[in-house]
Image (cartoon, rainbow, N blue to C red):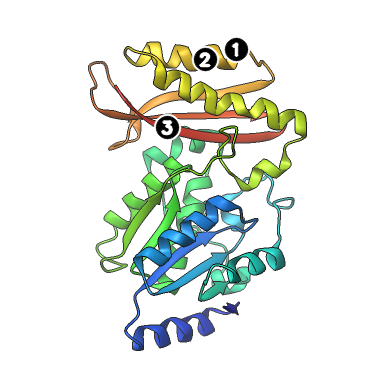
Amino acid sequence: MKIISSAADLAVAVSDARQQGKSVAFVPTMGALHDGHISLVDIAHQQADFVVVSIFVNPLQFGANEDFDKYPRTLQADAEKLSQFDVDVLFAPSVEDVYPNGNQITQHAGAVGETFEGAVRPGHFDGMLTVVARLFDLVKPDFSIFGNKDAQQLFLIRQMVTNSNHRWNAMQVIGAPIIREEDGLAMSSRNRYLSQEERELAQKISRALRAAEATDGHAAARIDAAQQVLATAPAVRLDYVVLVDPATFEPIEAGFVGRALLIIAARVGNTRLIDNLSITI
Ligand code: PAF
């Protein structure tokens, strides 16, 4: 595995692979890798011959009071992990390589970017899309792989690619299934912030989703079932639990039938956790 930090060296590595007739899959990350990330690497290998993983903690997607400074940076351990999974290139650029013209927002997430996660984290999705667009420009992959856990992020990336007028040619965006701990907690780099007690409380989030899935009835009954589970642990502070239409990321309307996405966000201690489950209404 090559570890590359400059955009110029990345371009050379990808162009060499292309000259050998290889297809390219890309897994963007912010590091602190866990098995969820490795599942994205596995999918990248299934899709393409040459796999690039990036690790970049993007300052543009963190708000002033968020965890940018304390976000776990574990580059050496991450590199060791990735080298065991046949990754071809680990791209770990500096801020200057990613943003040579300064940290300017170039992408706007629009209305959906202001709801749910975007309502709580103003500007987050503009910053996230800006870095993803820049990374797509640098890597020029055939496939890019993102976790379904960040469902609103994935929706907005797909929307950006669709609206981009083929800026990234025929690149396919692939959503990967959520990988969970044994107790159901969705894997996340932020789980490492949880104390043992908080870690146990955090199970309630996926249990709430499962309760909604197991409940017959329309949206209100499903949401109620999820809320009842969370009510048993007031220390899990619910932010939202909403059924959205995966086609629009807007709350489903009365009479909706089909697969809806139940999205949830809650705080446990100082840690904000999100999760989701696709359920048939
Ligand atoms: O999901 C993440 O880890 C980040 O938001 C991403 C897509 C790597 C952009 O910084």
Q: Tell me if the residue at label 2 has its CB under 8 Å from ligand 1.
A: no
Residue pictured at 43% horizontal, 45% vertical: 177
Choose between 269 and 58: the one closer to the eye: 269
Q: Please, is residue 117 above or below residue 126 in the view? A: above
Question: Residue flagged by tag 1: what amino acid is it?
Answer: Ala
Judged left or right of residue 257, residue 1 is right
Q: Are marks 1 and 2 in contact (CB under 8 Å)?
A: yes
Q: Label 3: which residue?
A: 277
Q: Which numbered circle lies on residue 231? A: 1
Mark 3 or 2: in front is 3
Q: Label 2: which residue?
A: 227
Residue 173 lies, in percent from the top left, at 34, 57
Residue 45 lies, in percent from the top left, at 42, 66
Q: Tell me if the residue at label 1 has its CB under 8 Å from ligand 1.
A: no
Q: Please, is residue 131 above or below residue 10 in the view? A: above
Residue pictured at 56% horizontal, 33% vertical: 184
Q: Which numbered circle lies on residue 219? A: none
Q: Residues under labels 3 and 2: Cα distance?
A: 15 Å
Q: Are marks 3 and 2 in contact (CB under 8 Å)?
A: no
Residue 263 lies, in percent from the top left, at 45, 30
Please tell me whether mark 2 sits on a helix, a strand or a loop.
helix
Question: Residue flagged by tag 2: what amino acid is it?
Answer: Gln
In this view of the protein, can residue 100 be seen by the observer?
no
In this view of the protein, can residue 53 be seen by the observer?
yes
Residue 141 lies, in percent from the top left, at 37, 70
Question: Residue flagged by tag 3: what amino acid is it?
Answer: Leu
Q: Residues under labels 1 and 3: Cα distance?
A: 19 Å
